Amino acid sequence: MDELTIPAMLRRAEHYSPDRPVVSREPDRSLHHTTWGEIGRRARRLSSALLGLGLTPGARVATLCWSHRQHLELYFAAPLAGLALHPLNPRLHVDDLAYIATHAGDEILVLDEGFLPIYEQIRDATPFRQVIVIGSATGDAIGYEDLLAGGDPDWQPGPIDEHSTALVGFTSGTTGRPKGVEVSHRAVALHGLSTALQGWLGISDTDVLLPVVPMYHALAWGWPYTAALLGAEIVLPGPFLDPESLLELFDSERVTLTGGVPTIWMGVLRILDTNPARFDLSAMRAILSGGSTAPASMITGYGERHRLNLVHTWGMSELMMGTIAGLSADLHQAPHQEQLRHRLKQGRPMPFVEIRARSEDSGFAPWDGESMGELEIRGPWVATEYLDSPEASAEQWTDDGWFRTGDIVTIAPGGYIEIADRAKDVVKSGGEWISTPTLEGALMAHPAVAEAAVIGVGDERWGERPLAVVAFHPGSSATAEELREFMAPRMARWWLPERIEIVETLPKTAVGKFDKVALRRRFTAPIGAGS
Ligand code: AMP
C-alpha cells in the first residue's frame, strides 16, 4: 500500500496550500520567508540529487542540524526517495554520536556549517561516505545548494510501501547505550492525523505552528508532516531557543500553537511575569509541554497570570506523542478545580493508542486514579522493536506486543494518565513509593526556587530516602527548613526530603531534562547533608 505516506502528505501541501508560509530563522537571526510550494519543489529536487549520490532504497541519511528550512526539506527529501532520515542530536556526547551513526549504518551526513567541529571529532569513527554542508563546504564535502542545483527539478517520487522506514531515531540512552527505533511512513501519517483531530490539537490551515523541541528530537518529528498534511504555516526558530528569541517569534509571527520541554517554558514564564505587556501572545491558543513533568505552579502560572493555555503532553522516542491533556466532554462543564486536576495530569491517549498499567502482582491496576503500575502502550506509531537489539527488545515488549514504557503511572477514569515517576527514578522508602515529580513540583512552586530535582539515596533504615537538589532564582534564597515547611501541607510528612542540596544550576541532559544520572553521581556518597 502506498497511501499513508510522506509523499502523499507533501503532495497535499503542494496542491492545496502552495502559498502557505514557511518562516525560518537564519544563522544571522534574520527571518527567511518561503512557502510550502517552494519547500515541495526543492525537496523533490533534493530527493533526485540524493539518489544521484548512488543511495539505494532504505539507505540512511543522517542530519546534524538545528530547526530550519533546509532541515524541513530533508525531512521530506529523504523519505520521498525511499531513504530513511536519521536526525542526530548535536548535544549528545561525541562517543554516543559515533556509536549511533555507525549502528544505524548512516551513509550520508548533512550538517550545519556550525557543527563541523563536532563532525571533526567523529569523522574517523563514522561510516559516512559523503558529507554535505549547509553553509560553505571545503575539502571532499559538497555544499547543500550545489547538491540541490544538480538535482532534477521535475523529479516525482515513485510508489512507496507505507510500512517502509521513513525515520530512524535513538533513545537518549540515560541507561546504557542508546537504542534505535524505526518509524514507518504509515506511523507518521496516522500520528499526524490523530494529533490534528478536533478535541486533541485541532490543527488546521489557519494555524501557525512553532515547534520549539529541536527537529532532531522525536517529540518534534510529527510537526513538519502534520503541518504539510493540513497546510498549516510553520515557523522554525533555528539555533535561537532562548526565551527572548522565542517570545519575539511568537509575537511577530502570530504563532497559534507551540511545543517544548518544561525547562524552556519556565524561562519563558519568568520573562512574561517580569514584563507581561512586552510581547503580544494573543494569537496563541495552546502551548504544549512534554518531555518531563510540567510543575503545577507553571501550568497555573500561565493560565492565571497570562491567560495562556499550557497543555501537558507525554511522549517518548519510541512513539513520538502518546497522550494529550485535553478535557473530555464530561469535564467541559465541571468546576474549574476539577478541570485543573485533570489538566495537570499527562493526558488521555490519542485515538488509536491503547494503554494499561501493569501492577506489581502482574495484574493490571484499576483505572481509579490511585493505583500505580507500569504504563504499557500499543498503537500504530508505537515501535515494535529496537534496531538490531533482540535482547533489549525482548525486555521492553511484552509477549503480546505491548511496549513497556518504564513510567510508573496512575490511570483515572476516562483514561487520564498521571506519571508518578520513571521506574528507575522512583524513590522506594520503607517499601512505599515516593513520586519525585511531586516533590519537584512542590519545591518549584516556592517563589525562590528556579529549578529542583529529587533523587533517591541509600538509607540504612528506610532502604532509600529522597534528596532534593535546588537552584534559586538570582538574588533569591531560602533555608532547607523553610523549603520543607513550604512543602509540608502538600504531601505526607514522610515524603519530605531530609537532605536539600543547593547548587548554582542543575545539570541537564542532551534533551533539556534534569540529568539525574549526573546528580546521583555527585550526591549519592553519604556526605554531610547540606540541609
Ligand atoms: P525520551 O524518549 O527521551 O523522549 O524520554 C521519554 C520519557 O520522558 C518518558 O518515558 C517519560 O518518563 C518522560 N516524559 C515525557 N513526557 C513527560 C511528561 N509530560 N511528564 C512526565 N514525564 C514525561
Image (cartoon, rainbow, N blue to C red):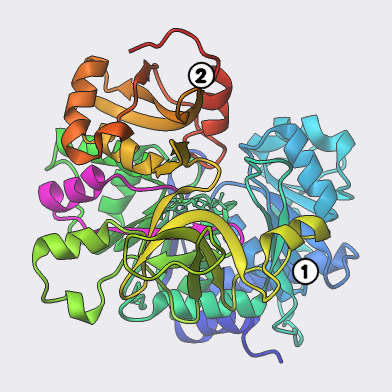
Looking at this rendering, what residue extends furthest in the top direction?
A: 528
Q: Which amino acid type corresponds to the residue marked 1 in the rendered image?
A: Leu
Cα separation, mark 1 vs mark 2, equals 45 Å
On residue 516, the disc is: none
Choose the circle earlier in sequence order: 1 or 2.
1
Q: Residue at x 62, y 45 (%)?
A: 172
Q: Find numbered disc 1 in the image and state the secondary structure of the residue it sits on.
A: loop
Looking at this rendering, what residue extends furthest in the left direction?
A: 335
Q: Which amino acid type corresponds to the residue marked 2 in the rendered image?
A: Phe
Does the magenta segment cover residue 316?
A: yes
The picture places residue 134, in percent across and down from the top left corner, at 67, 47
Picture quarter with the C terminus:
top left
**Looking at the image, residue 520 lies above or below residue 382:** above
Is residue 117 visible in this depiction of the protein?
A: yes
**Looking at the image, residue 529 lies above or below residue 110:** above
The picture places residue 168, in percent across and down from the top left corner, at 71, 61
Q: Residue at x 62, y 66 (%)?
A: 403
Residue receiving disc 2: 523
Q: Find numbered disc 2 in the image and state the secondary structure of the residue it sits on.
A: helix
Q: Residue at x 89, y 47 (%)?
A: 127
The picture places residue 105, in percent across and down from the top left corner, at 85, 55
Q: Which residues are magenta?
A: 292-318
**Looking at the image, residue 524 lies above or below residue 30:** above
The picture places residue 109, in percent across and down from the top left corner, at 77, 50
Does the magenta segment cover residue 296?
A: yes
Badge nearest the viewer, 1 or 2: 2
On residue 83, the disc is: 1
The image quadrant that residue 194 belongs to is bottom left
Is 325 positioned to the left or the right of 461 in the image? left
The image quadrant that residue 410 belongs to is bottom left
Near-viewer residue (78 or 349):
349
Near-viewer residue (423 or 178):
423
